[in-house]
Structures are given as structure tokens and as C-alpha cells.
Image (tube, grey):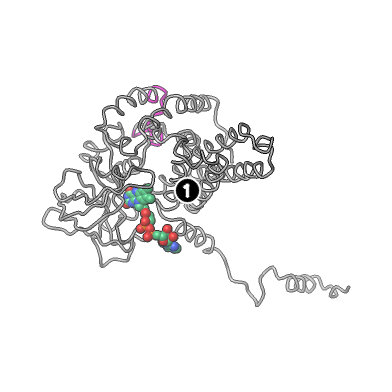
Amino acid sequence: MDFRVDPEFQQKLDWMNRFVREEVEPVDLLFPNASSMYDTKNEQARALIRPLREQVKAQGLWACHLPPELGGKGYGQLKLALMNEVIGRSSWAPTVFGCAAPDTGNAEILALYGTAEQKRRYLQPLLDGEIVSCFSMTEPQAGADPKEFTCKASRDGAEWVIEGEKWYSSNARFASFLIVMAVTNPENAPHERMSMFIVPAETPGIVIKRNVAGMNDDPDDGTQAYIHYDRVRVPFDAMLGKPGEAFKVAQARLGGGRIHHAMRTVGVCNRAMEMMLERAVSRRTQGRLLADHQFVKGMIADSAIELEQFRLLVLKTAWIIDNEPHGAARTHIGMCKVAMARVYHDVVQRAVHLHGALGTSRDTPLAKMWMGIPMLAVADGPTEVHQVQVANALLKSAKPAEGLFPSDHIPTKLARIVQKNCMNPLKK
Ligand SMILES: Cc1cc2nc3c(=O)[nH]c(=O)nc-3n(C[C@H](O)[C@H](O)[C@H](O)COP(=O)(O)OP(=O)(O)OC[C@H]3O[C@@H](n4cnc5c(N)ncnc54)[C@H](O)[C@@H]3O)c2cc1C
């Protein structure tokens, strides 16, 4: 495995690094709310990011996750991993680089399963960053286990009628369309009961009951919608994929989303590390710099080691996606998801702690990082679900021991070797 890149691409990364620090991070300070990021009608914020997007486009770095047929570069995941490490430093950078979730995944679904008309109406403006979208899957009574979902869609003449509730549908209030998962074939096996639909935002019956605020958001500025689909009617061709194929369609987006989150988490952790190092060589206590205390050195070393391990896992996963058959990276993507939440927690916790009272305030980016910890472990499926998936994949090829003792039981093995070589039993 080779994680090096050509000098030309390295120059792009260097440009990105400068650009994100100098031009994009200031936007984070001016518009810190998630809502301003997704509200395409927020003219003040849009006016600020329009010229930044032009610079990204001029560098050929707009929406690089896309395949060439959709206007992307066709960069593999390894290059995207390195780019996302830079993008991860700033909340606004994904919007400025045309690769913000959930629009990236929704674009993938539309590109794969949309009709020509749906692509014309939604895909192109989404790819151009003119509109935003929503992925509406989780329900208030069930998230981590979609087999418990009850929101249903029934046929009525040439239409589907969607009825039920969804929860934590990010950015629904700004979205031009929603991709909704609903039960259509209750008689099928659990994983074949649901289908995916594209629902234009102006369709009658989409009732946003509340916009729930995450820990990071202002309480009255939530972006996570609790929605009642109250007999929402969509045409027959609103189904994306075939009846009962929602899991297959969802998987097309979630795999990519998870690895991109992991790549960006490396970027946020790098920023926390930089802050930790600066603090260690700036602050004095007991007549010495923090950096001269062994406990502090331990925190720095542990953070660097854990982050490097995680980064290599992410790069290896990206390499597998680029070089091995489709689906080969599934277990590694699960590993990244689990490791991501843990490493992020540990590195950010140490950075906060080393900043003392300042670290507990809202005066540094560490506050936002800290409040992101629980979300990283829950969004896109909680840690435990991925642990189970990783373990199951490994256990699939495990075989039980043939006899009473494990295959590596030394006395049993030794007895076999002795017998095979017609030796006398070893004596002390
Ligand atoms: C910031 C954020 C954005 C989100 N955006 C969207 C979105 O745009 N669209 C959307 O549809 N959803 C979205 N979600 C919802 C997300 O997908 C769900 O929160 C996630 O799937 C977990 O579901 P849940 O919240 O119902 O947790 P639950 O299913 O209630 O799980 C709670 C806890 O139970 C335990 N648990 C659950 N399952 C298992 C298991 N199999 N084994 C062992 N323990 C288990 C875990 O400790 C888990 O954390 C978002 C969530 C967050 C935090």
C-alpha cells in the first residue's frame, strides 16, 4: 500500500491548507450556526462564500467526490481522504468545497436511481450548490434498527401515499427535496420491506412538528426536523430503486458518508493537536512550561499515537475502496466509524483539559469540538452496531476447535509433533 501522492496533487493540498485556514475558518467565526450553512436564502453568508467557491472551482477542487461523468475529478478515496483532512478543520469548508452531507449522499442516490426529469430538476442544482436536500430515514421510535420503522407508503392509483413520522431529518427546513424511506412491502423479509422515495419539499402534508436543536446549536435554531408525513402524495416514479430496495439504496450513500466523516475527523483532531502543542509551550506552571511536565508529555504522545493509528486505518480503508472489489472495505469502514468516535473523544478531551478554564469556555473552537463528541458516536449508526458488524465479519470465517482444547493448546500440539516424527516424548 502506497499513500504517497504526486507532486501536482500535493500542491493542491498545500493550496487547500492555506485557503481553509486563511479564508474559510473566518466564515466559521462570522456564521457559527448550522442553520446559516444550509439556509440558501441567507444572503449575507452566501455573498461571503460565493467568491470562495469560485476560487475552489478555479483550482478544479469543487465537488471532488463525484465521478467524472457528474463533473468531479474521479479522484479515488485516498486523495479524497487527504483533501478531507484539510476540509475537516472548518465547519464551512464542506459547503465551500461542494461536498457537504447529506447532499453528497443524496446526489449519489439520485445519480444512480433518479429519472432523467428528477436529475434535471434536483441533481444539477444540488451539484452546483444552489439547493440543499434532506435524508429522512430515522423514526422517533427507532433509529439504529431500521427494521423497526413504521412510516409506510401505499399505492393509490398512480400515486404513492406516505404516512408516518421521521425524526432527526437534518436540514429539512431548508431542503428543496427529501429522500424518504417507507415501508411498502410489509410481507417481505425484514430487509426487503422498505422503499425509497423522492419527495419535493413543497408537497402538501409535510408537517415539521419541531426543529430539534443539537447540543452545538442555539436552542431556538435547531436543524434536526421531527416530521409528520401526513398522507403525502407523490407520483409513481417518485420511488428510487425498486420496491423493497431501500436498504440497498441507503447503503449506496451511507458507506461513502461514513468514510468521509472519518477523514474529516482526522482534520479536526489535527487542529486539536495543534492547539494542545501551542498551549504546552506557552503556559507555565510550577516554574516550568506545561510541556516540561511528564503528565503533559504523556497526553501529547498518546494523542499523537492514537491519531496516527486512526489516520492509517482511514487511509488503508480508502486504499481498499480504490483497489479492491466493491464492498471489500465494509468491515474497515465499520472499524473507522468505531475508532473515529473514540479517538476524537480522547484527543479533544486532552486538548480541552490542557487549556484549563479556557478550555471549558466558548472562547476557543474546542467547545464546539467537545459538544460534537456524542453526535459522532451516534449519527450514521451508534458505535455498538458497527462493533457487532466488524465482529460478525471476522467470526464468519472462524472455525471451532476440533478437539476439547484450542488448536494452539501446546501439550496437544507437541504430542502430535512427537507422534509425527516418531520421537520419544520429551523428558526433563
Ligand atoms: C447529528 C445527527 C444528525 C443526524 N442526521 C440524520 C439525518 O439527516 N437523517 C436521518 O434519517 N437520521 C439522522 N440522524 C439519526 C441517526 O441516524 C440515529 O440517531 C442513529 O441511527 C441512532 O438511532 P437512535 O438515535 O434512534 O438511537 P437508538 O437506536 O435509540 O440507540 C440508542 C443506543 O442504544 C444502543 N444500541 C442501539 N442499537 C444497538 C445494538 N444493535 N447493539 C447494542 N447497542 C445498541 C447504543 O448505545 C445506542 O447509542 C442523525 C443523528 C445525529 C446525531
Place residue 295 in its image quadrant: top right
Residue 315 in the image, given as x and y percentages of width and height: 54, 42
Magenta residue span: 56-70
Most distant residue in the left direction: 157
The residue under the point 53% across, 46% down is 349
Q: In this view, does 420 lie to the left or right of 203?
A: right
Residue 119 in the image, given as x and y percentages of width and height: 25, 39
Label 1 residue SS: loop
Most distant residue in the front direction: 286
Q: In this view, does 84 lie to the left or right of 150?
A: right
Label 1 crowd (10 A; few <14 / some 14-19 / many >=20): few
Position of 282 relative to 224 (above/below):
above
Residue that mark 1 sits on: 325
Residue 41 in the image, given as x and y percentages of width and height: 24, 32
Residue 16 in the image, given as x and y percentages of width and height: 47, 27
Regarding ligand 1, which quadrant of the image does it lie in? bottom left
Place residue 124 in its image quadrant: top left
